[in-house]
Structure formats: structure tokens, C-alpha cells
Image (cartoon, grey):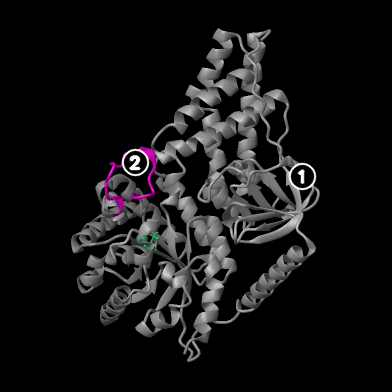
Amino acid sequence: MITISGQTVHKRTAIGRLQYLSKTHPELLRVPAGDPQAELAAFRKAKAEVVGRLHELYRESVSKVGELLAHTFEIHAMMVEDEAYSGMVESMIGAEKVTAAYAVAATGRHYAQMLAQMEDPYFRSRSEDITEITERLTDVLLGNRHEVTLTEPVILMAEDLAPGETMQLDHSRILGIVTHLGSESSHAAILARTMNLPAITGIAISDAWDGHEAVLDGENGLLIVDPDAETKASYEAKIQRKMREEEELRALLPLPCETKSGVKVPLLANVGSVADAAAAAEKGAEGIGLLRTEFLCLAGEDYPTEEQQLETYKSVLAAMQGKPVTIRTFDLGADKRAAYMNLPKENNPDLGFRAIRISLAEEEPFRAQLRAILRAGAFGKVSVMFPMITAEWELRRIDALFREESERLAAAGIPTGDIQKGIMIETPAAAIICDRLMPYVDFVSIGTNDLTQYLLAADRSNSFVTPYYDPHHEAVMRTIASVVRTAHEHGVSVCVCGELAADTTATEELLRLGVDAFSAAPNAMLPLKRKIRECE
Ligand code: PEP
Ligand code: MG
């Protein structure tokens, strides 16, 4: 029995046979091409085949992981067709008389290295994409096949898995994923979580383990190869316990979310994609309390258009089958940025150009988003919510823009819905002047993640101050109490949508303070419902 320690990607456990996915791409030799014209033709044919396959993968993946993540394949198709990339390949074939496969590999290496050295994390992550499309092209040119066909459920191990490869996996035959490279926050990791696959990374893989039995302990980031009988039995018992617990939770699905004394508490979901919305509907969400739309902005080369957004919002509404959806406008800035946004470098990004501040400064993308939200309202119950509000003037400006776009759509005869408006209370300023802000809104949602970091002066992503970042701190609880009191005096309902909403040790107190609704990640919803049903 060997135990190797890595990092958790998705905290689930699997037991099964290991299958090694060989992805060796041998260094291509610079051999002269016999006929450059034939190489050019081969490149163009491979390009068309890869683009066709990518479109096909996009269509297949939408139902597996949702439009937002599947969109990666469309971006890859655009990259394959990119003129600079193709131009460099074609001019190498023409001028240096090399094979198409060599020209593709050399071009891919050039762009991947260039991007990998960039400071901006957005460009650095694009380097992986270039490598992925380059490998697709060389595989076609050389007749290699790396797409896995699995005949029995296995734990897949690979040096690295590209996002596209992860999405392509036959979900019903994969018990888990073990990789050497990658990180907890890589695209492939997000996908593994979305697909609910046990996964770990940081494991120095050995092909000698191919076919061996193993335990993938996603909870503790461990791979145990050839487990002894005792270890295997203890993990089997753990999986059984987990399954029983999941079954118990599923039994709660048809029951109402209410306290023992019969107070109904709407249980809403926090989602960032269509796939999340589908997961939320499965977990019995009564609506979406927070749709994080900024993820729409991070995958592409520009802000998503009004039409693209409308399609996504409609898909989320469809996944929720008539239940209400609260769309939060882009919460960009800080760690959520893309190169095309040209955001400034800041010493204190969390105190800087973020969220509504960007929306009010970059009016065009904001207006397009408001129009998409207004139009989505014609297809279901839609509310809009604005992040990181600190002052009344912001709400006056938002109201003016909202009115202008609404009138513009009406004048063009484009149908819109009746949209409720709300704000996130996630800055101390908004909490303190809550009474001033209430006349502008129909509801508020308390973002305890940011509210905690700003109230306690403790960066939410800085591990040095973790002991100071305490959402249970009396200052946070008193602030929530005061917001609830003021909002209720104005007839405004209060939801909590930060991570504290999912923390069942806080549920009783939040209910006692008068919080009306909870919005939490889909996986947290049923444990939360169980807790609410136990409260007086
Ligand atoms: C919050 O700040 O609590 C919140 C829900 O927003 P986000 O985590 O997206 O900043
Ligand atoms: Mg926030």
C-alpha cells in the first residue's frame, strides 16, 4: 500500500481501478517537408476538422456543464481560426519548408511560452488553451488518438487534464480524477466540481499503477494505491455513511422549508452558471438568490453582448422552471478581472475599482447588462441586485440608467418584465445608512463575505489574517441585526447570501435576528433546510 499526498480539488471519495491516460506528445523533429503545398493543404484540412469537432463538443457539453463552461470550446474554435496563429503556421510551412505538424507545434510553443510569461493571470491561463488547441491539431495531423474510451468505471490519472478533456469524459464511467499538474482553482478543477467528480491534484503519477486498485480520498487530498483490506474497508464504510446521509437529505426534498413553529423560510441558491442553476433546482431551490454574472465576463475576449447575456439568463430561468431569479450585476475587479477590461493596477484592489464602481464608470457594458436583465424579465420572474453599494448617489444614478434603458426598449417595442430592484449590503457604509437606501429598493441581500472583511479590516483571501476574519464576530451579528431592523421598518425583506448563510451553526441566530430568506451554494441547501426545520 502506498499513500501519496496531494491537494483536494473536490472533496468526495472513490474506490476503483486506476487507469493511466497517456498524453505523451513527443518532441516533433524539424524534418524538411517533401511538398509544402501538400503540407499547407493538410494544415487547412486539420484546422477544419478540429473546428468542426470543437463545435460538436460545445453542443455535447452544454447539457453536461452548462453554457458558460461549455463556451470554452467555442473560444478554442476561435483560437484555431485566429489569423495570427494560422498565419504563423502557414508562413513557416511556406518559408521554412517544414511539415505542418512541426509548424503547428512550434507556433503553439511560441504563443504558449509568450503568454505563460505574462504577469496578468488572464493571459497566463490562455497559455493552457493554446497548448490544448495545438495538441488537438498535431493529433489530427499525426493521426494520434488521445480521446479516452472507457469500458468500465475507473479512477482516471493523467499528468494534466485540459478543460476540454475533462468535459469530454464519459461521466458515467469515471469514478474520480487524479492529476499531477493543475491547481484547485484551474478551469479543469472547477469542471470536476461542477461534474461532482472526486478529484485531487499534485500527485506525482506513475504509469506503473495502471490497473491497480486505489482509494481517492478527496477530503484529505490522498491517493492510496493498493490499499490493504483494513484501509479499503474503512473507506467503503465512509462512502456508505456518505450515501446514507445523502439519502436522508434527499428525503427532505418534498418537505417545506419552515421552522418548527411553521414560519416559512425561502431557501434560495447562489449560482454562477446554468449548470449550477440546474443543480440548484435538483436540490429544491425555491429560486436563485444570487446569480453571479461576472463569470460571463472572465472567459471571453470582451464583455458579453446583450444577446449573449439574454441567452444565459433565459437558460437559468428555464433551469429554474418558473421560480424567481435574482441577477446580480457584474461584480468585477479585485481578483475577478480580464485583460480587455484594462483595469488599473491597485495597491488595495478590494478597496478599489470594483463591482458597481466599474459598472458606473464603464457605462456601455452596464447599460447592455441592464437591457439584457430587463428583457430576461419577459421570460420569467427576474430581480436585479447591485453589488458593493456605499452611497445614495449610486442608487440615484442606477435608477436613471435603468429608467433610460427601460424606456429605450419600450420605444423599440422590445418586451421587458417588471423587475424588482435590490442591493447587496456588504459594506459598513451601506449598513449604517441603510435607512437612506431603503426607499430605492424592494429587497436587500446581506453579503457577509465582504461585510465581514470590511467590518473587521481582514482581507477575505489573505491567510495571514484568517483568525481575524470571523463572520460570527459580534460586530457582524450586530450589523446584521441593525440592517434587518431598519429594512423591516421600511417593509423591505432581507436575505443573507454570503457563506454565513450556509453555516448551520449560525442559522438559529440569523433566524432570531429576523432574516427572511437564505441563499446558499446548491450543495449546502439540504443541510441548511434540515437545520431550519430543527429551529423553533
Ligand atoms: C458576499 O460578499 O458575501 C457575496 C455574496 O458576494 P461575493 O462573495 O460574490 O463577493
Ligand atoms: Mg461580495
The quarter holding residue 448 reads bottom left
* Depth order, front residue of 270/190: 190
**Left or right: 379 as drawn, with respect to 470:** right
> Does ligand 1 reach within 8 Å of label 1's beta carbon?
no
Q: Under tag 1, what secondary structure?
A: loop
The image position of residue 190, as x and y in percent, is: 54, 52
- Residue 447 visible within the image: no
Residue 82 in the image: x percent, y percent? Answer: 50, 27
The dot on residue 210 is 1
**Mark 1 burial class by Cα count in 10 Å: few <14, some 14-19, many 20+:** some
Q: Residue furthest bottom?
A: 261
x and y percentages locating residue 111 in the rendered image: 49, 26
Residue topped by disc 2: 341
Q: Secondary structure at mark 2?
A: helix
Q: Quadrant of the N terminus?
A: bottom right
Looking at the picture, which amino acid does disc 2 mark? Met
